[in-house]
Image (cartoon, rainbow, N blue to C red):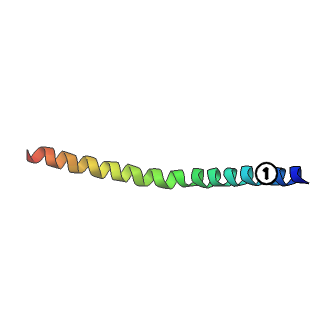
Amino acid sequence: MEVAGWAAVAVGSITGGVSVLGYLADQVPGLSTKVIKAVRSLRAVKDEVMRRR
């Protein structure tokens, strides 16, 4: 009976981990678009500051 409990915990943990990793992988495209916009904005600010010097 004790082994069955540990097996259930192990299967649940693996399932939860895979679910979290799947969710995070689904978020990458949306986040990458935002990161690209942020980097472009920072570069534009840096270029503007460098022009003023």
Residue pictured at 52% horizontal, 51% vertical: 28
Name which residue lies at 36% across and 53% down: 37
Q: So how many labels did they put on this image?
A: 1
Residue extending farthest left: 53
Which residue is painted at 59% across and 50% down in the image?
A: 25
Residue 15 left/right relative to 47 = right
- Pointer 1 local density, CA inside 10 Å: few below 14, some 14–19, many at least 20: few
Give the residue furthest to the right. Answer: 1
User: Disc 1 marks which amino acid?
Assistant: Val
Residue 48 % position (x, y): 16, 49
Q: Quadrant of residue 9?
A: bottom right
Quarter of the image for the N terminus: give it: bottom right
Local secondary structure at mark 1: helix
Left or right: 5, with 52 as reference point: right
The residue wearing badge 1 is 11
- Direction from residue 5 to residue 33 in the image, left or right: left
**Which part of the image, by quadrant, shows the C terminus?**
top left
Q: Position of residue 45 (x, y in %)?
A: 22, 51
User: Which residue occupies the foreground of this view, 9 or 29?
Assistant: 9
Q: Quadrant of residue 12?
A: bottom right
Establish if 51 lies above or below 19.
above
Query: Residue 4 appears at what percent x and percent y?
Result: 88, 52
Of residues 4 and 15, the one nearer the viewer is 4
Identify the residue at image location x=41%, y=55%: 34
Q: Residue furthest front?
A: 2
